[in-house]
Image (cartoon, rainbow, N blue to C red):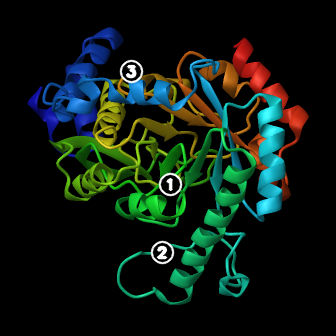
Amino acid sequence: PAAALRGTIAEMEQALREHAESDESYERLRRRQQAVLFQLEEVPPDPPRVKSQEGWSTLRLSFDGSTPGPPYLLAMLHVLTPEQVVQSIGYALQAGANGVVLVNSGHAHSPPEAAMAMLGVQRASLKGPSGGASGKAGKAQLEALAECFGAARQAYPRAWLGVSLPQLPAAQVFKWLMSHCPTADAVWLHQLACKPADVTWESSVDASVGGQPQQPQALAVRVEKWLTDHQPALKGVVRERQIVSWKGLVIGSVAIQGQDRVHHAQDDDGMGDACQTLLRHWVSIASSVCDVVATGSPDPGRACAVAKLKAMGGVTPVALTSSGCQGEDVGAAGCVDVAIADGRALAGGATAEEGKLFEFDIEQLRAWVSRWRDA
């Protein structure tokens, strides 16, 4: 009915209920309604890189032919000092990890006096003014990462080593990489500015539970316009990747904590067709510059929904960032091509102490590798 396609969510829901003759009829009508509201027949085609499956071939070429995988198992190491990095990489490789990704989560600075009182990732820019104290701290974090990577590469010249650069806008990553870590096997883009569609949202408040009022919940109502990979910010990243001579693997974050959501059900196992289509198209657009998309749970204490991984799969390789929740690896088996875990996730995730970020327990890492290999 036309009334089920306009107005608020509550008004459209009431129109569906009044028109439906049974629960089965209601479900059929709702699926048709969602298909119209979210324009599921108007989704743009995949970019050329998806059609040619470049992500899959680049992932395979990134690892030696004798390397077991997929899934390829990567340990993420939060850097402190070059000595700590060299020692921890040794543990990771002994435990059977296929490689190690280095990231500075705000705890290492070069020079040390550039650090701010509140530790954490500081944004930096390679263009224009320094950005004040925070910009200087961000550049010092990048310099510390470069020093740690240099020590790691010298100690392990043939190991698979990647870097994660949350300090930089995605369009500036490749130029920095060429200058500071040209032998890196992979780079991880965190600030990837792209979205699959313009979505209209509505704030909804359910009835109180147990007499307690509930917080408003933002609900996706409809797609106003599907978007393509011609988004200006994304085109800038594509251009920067194309003009550098570095040919390593590019990982990009999609549907992770800190990013705007595309649908209220994107982290639920009970997501519908509209949510699945939005997630798939998000991956498709990101793959115009990324070989692998990385995702995970928005809640450190909650495993990533398997439905989310399935919805995002099949377009380009998918990496799962481990939450540390028990059984997550078994549930995700067959849905992902890369699995990534840091020391804290290996030690139990949200319940583990922060110090676990900077070290690997070789037995915990060995057990994690074994679970993935046996899954």
Corner quadrant of residue 133: bottom right
Label 2: which residue? 124
How far apart marks 1 and 3 lie (CA) works out to: 30 Å
- The secondary element bearing badge 3 is classed as loop
**Image vertical order of residue 224 relative to residue 267, above or below:** below
Instruction: Tell me, yes or no, whether the two marked residues, 2 and 3, touch with CB atoms within 8 Å.
Output: no
Instruction: Tell me the residue at 27%/42% (across/down).
Output: 196
Q: Residues within 10 Å of mark 2 (few under 14, many from 20)?
A: many
Q: How far apart are the alpha carbons under marks 1 and 2?
A: 20 Å
**N-terminal-most mark, 1 or 2:** 2
Name the secondary structure under disc 1: loop
Q: Nearer the viewer, residue 344 or 222?
A: 344
For disc 3, the neighbor class at 10 Å (few under 14, some 14 to 19, many from 20) is: some
- Give me the disc on residue 314: 3
Residue on which the image places disc 1: 182
Q: Residue 265 carries which label?
A: none
Amino acid type of disc 1? Pro
> How many other residues sit within 10 Å of disc 1, few (<14), some (14-19) or many (≥20)?
some
Q: What element carries label 2?
A: loop
Q: Can residue 335 be seen by looking at this rendering?
A: yes
> Which three-letter amino acid code belongs to the residue tagged 2?
Ala
The residue mark sitting in front, 1 or 3, is: 1
Look at the image and tell me whether residue 347 can be seen: no
Tell me which corner region of the image, top left, top right, bottom left or bottom right, holds residue 243. Answer: bottom left
Q: Nearest the camera: 238 or 304? A: 238
* Residue 285 image offset from top left, x and y in percent: 28, 40
